[in-house]
Image (cartoon, rainbow, N blue to C red):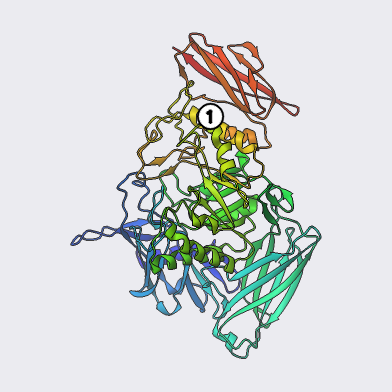
Amino acid sequence: MNKIKQSLLILSLLIPCLATEARTKIPLTEGWMFSKTPATGEARQWNIVNVPHTWNSEDGCTPDYYRGGGRYEYRINRDTIPGDGRLFLRFEGVSQDADVEVNGRQVGNHKGAFTAFCFEITDYLTEGENKITVDVSNAPDPNIAPLEGDFTVFGGIYRPVALISLPSTCISPLDYASSGVYVTPYDISSESAKVKVKAKLDGEELANKNNLSLTVNIIDPYGEVIESKTFKCDKLKTSKAEIEGKFKIKNPVLWSDKNPALYTVKAELLNGKTSKDVVEEKFGLRNVSIDPRSGFYLNGEKHRLKGVNRHQDRKGKGWAISNKDHDEDMSMIKAMGANAIRLAHYPHSSYFYDLCDKEGMLVWAEVPFVGHGTESREFSDNISEQLRELIHQNYNRPSIFCWGLFNEIGNENMTPVVELLNSIAHEEDPSRFTVAATNQDNKSFNNVPDFIAYNTYPGWYWADPSTMGAAIDWKSNERGVGISEYGAGGSVKCHDQNISSAPKTDGSYHPEEWQSKVHEGNYAEIKKHPHVWGTFVWNMFDFASGGRKEGDTNGMNDKGLVTYDRKTPKDAYYFYQAEWSDTPVMHITSKRHEIREEDTTPVKIYTNCKNPLLMVNGEILGSPDSFDGVVAQWNSIALQQGENLVEVTGEYEDKKISDNCRWIKK
């Protein structure tokens, strides 16, 4: 790319950038050069790519997907960057080891695939063209978590990158790549709430006599400034400083799933009356608590967490997904009626956390401590740093109610690491719980977090779906119990109307009907145990796991309620929609089982409608043989040779709701 084209590109990027008078954020999206690390003696092969980008978009579902190195280069002309202050590079996610250079000079290194990092590059730039180089590797590293996991570790700069232009003294972007503004609500009730605001400032002017001040405005969900305070910065005598103030809000609007009201803190750094820098942060006012005997509470009211787990990848894109992809995921989760998400097994995109704040989703956010760790100082330092980054970058989010410390670690020699993480979480953020997901009983590390939840799969890896109740009773204790994972594999290509036990779980045959039966049986037992503080279906979407050889597609975990490409909700999706949503649901199961060989068949529907009725080939067959308010079934319905039209109807308030399908009897 020549200099003229590069300059035009930068100018075009400035049009949509977010800016105040002095702060400018320029997305670095188009025109990156990329090359995989070549074998010794071979020349580099370059391609032009857009960021976000991963080199595993095509091979991520194969057991030998590429885990190695790659190089990104970007050229930028200093003359096209507005302002004459300080410049910072902020990466939201690079997998998983990143070395950053500017004009051949080392700027910094970051280890960890899922959290943002920010480097100042002011002194590295020169007039005219500058070259940014990022050497990236997703090769396994015993010092970088996760060390294992049932998911593909996609490589690359797979989340957005931005160049941030700031004045010489500013609200710092360097505190674990956070916004530099932290909001802590406390003493929250329907009558009043208190808020502590802390801003981190950076710049040599702070250490000298100056005319600087920081004005902090609290803006309500309707856009009105309800409190404002100004703090002088002329006696700080340090180039790095914290400004802290307390505010009181009368008659607060509480954040909830039904009304996700968001307040705004606007922190403005001024030199006299001239604005130097502005940061705005959303926050919410809400109380959460867990009673081991009765479950989860939101704003003092019992609140059943109807949760799902989510991985961030999708077909043909891996981890390099767009805001539109995030929107689609949230839309499908909301439409199903879920009100909570465990964002497994690592920190997710800031854009998706934004969606959770806006949509009233309660979030379990966790670090990638998966399977096992090592006792090395390097490993504990790395997972500790990833936890601090997760907390600092997402501190203000009302959606996040807990910090997850581990998932299914296997050996008790990791207990000291869990203890370290627990102390860090409470030190950095005393306002939230710590939790963890385990698949083992009676382990010392289970006793470290504030609350523990279990990954358990009755009806899939062991026993019958109805034994979920016994599992809950066994695992319940004085700290209560949560179910962090449960579910079963399911293929939209495999069908069996008479299946009565789990198929071979590591085989290719995963009938959709058995997945549905597992969820029906599991959730029936969960509903009988109101003290369970949260349950999270595994998984919302099918996801890549390169080493798997099971289900209808190798390299895939098919426990999702929706296919990997997001095009096909499985029957179990509609089961939860009928259980959880406030919109009418009428869904005939096994629609995809179009070719039938037996003379009779069961007809099963998922619905939240009243008075379901069945009609086959125009003949009214009446009410179901069984109906528990969600699952209705007609046991033995005769099919005629050739095509059969199956129709069901029900009543939702004053509306008639229907569904239909066609089955062919051979």
Q: Is residue 233 visible?
A: yes
Residue 159: image x %, image y %? 46, 57
Which is more toward the observer, 373 or 583? 373
Above or below, comparing residue 145 to residue 316 in the picture: below
Q: Is residue 162 visible?
A: no
Residue 328: image x %, image y %? 54, 44
Q: How many other residues sit within 10 Å of disc 1, few (<14), some (14-19) or many (≥20)?
A: many
Which is more toward the observer, 168 or 20? 168
Left or right side of 98 for 326 = right
Residue 371: image x %, image y %? 42, 53
For mark 1, what is the residue?
Answer: 517
Q: Residue at x 45, y 45 (%)?
A: 314
Above or below, comparing residue 486 to residue 236 in the picture: above
Above or below, comparing residue 261 to residue 102 in the picture: above
Task: Provide the secondary structure element on which disc 1 rests.
Answer: helix
Task: Say which amino acid is labelled 1.
Answer: Lys
The C terminus lies in quadrant: top left
Residue 50: image x %, image y %? 41, 56
The N terminus lies in quadrant: bottom left
Left or right side of 380 for 265 = right
